[in-house]
Image (cartoon, grey):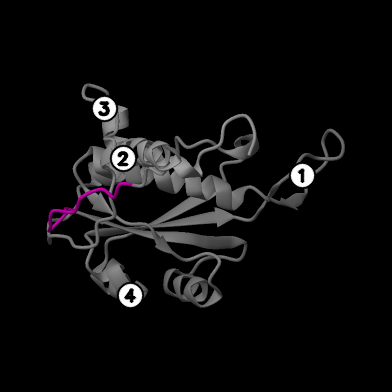
Amino acid sequence: MKKFAFALFAVALAAVACSPAPDQSGNAALETIFNRKSVRSYTEQALSSQQIETLLRAAMCAPSGMNMQPWRFVVVTDPQVRNALGGLSAKASAVFVVCGETMMKGRPAEEGAEAPMVPNGNWNADCAAATENLLLAAEAIGLGAVWTACYPYEERMNQVRTVLGLPEGVTPYCVVPVGYPAGDDQPKDKWKPENIHYDRW
């Protein structure tokens, strides 16, 4: 009896784990989220200035701790600069380098005083939110993109700093190649009920 009960439990668990996502047809935002994928091969078709601005506007709609908005963006379309960044950047039509200002102006001690520069401990979380917005926007307008790591890898950060001439206090967070997909990439199923806890662990 115990074996039978365990078998039923295993079947039920497998059914839940393999069940498709709820039908979200008609909900454009959820369709975009579920369809987002990492695209690493691109055609030679260039992005328009309007597409680039749309992606940047979407990135800047991200939430930001205390509304500090520490994100800064370098958009690279020059083939020589893309090649110097290396990796997938050389293959994409445009590359968005998401950077963060790690020091921001704080509140002055008294009215009329100069605002001091203080560390912004939220900069990398804010940049992550902006990057995700950018990726979702690329998916929504039919483009392919992929998040490639930069921070906290010192060697990679130094390369990006040097190639782009970033000023002191601006840290490269990630590099996002964007272009028209050359293949038929599909989103990965990352739904794992075992990673979910309710009310407490």
Asked if the residue under mark 4 is in contact with the one under mark 2, i.e. CB atoms within 8 Å, the reply is no
Q: From what the image shows, is residue 186 above or below residue 50?
A: below
* Residue corresponding to mark 2: 137
* Residue corresponding to mark 4: 86
Rendering quarter of residue 191: top left
Query: Distance between the Cα atoms at labels 1 and 3?
Result: 43 Å
N-terminal label among 1 and 2: 1
Q: Residue furthest right?
A: 110
Query: Distance between the Cα atoms at labels 2 and 3?
Result: 11 Å
Secondary structure, mark 2, is helix
Magenta-tinted stretch: 180-189
What is the quadrant of the C terminus in the image? top right
Residue 115 is marked as 1
Which amino acid type corresponds to the residue marked 2 in the rendered image?
Ala
Asked if the residue under mark 4 is in contact with the one under mark 1, i.e. CB atoms within 8 Å, the reply is no
The reply to whether residue 54 is in sight is: no
Q: Main secondary structure of the magenta part?
A: loop
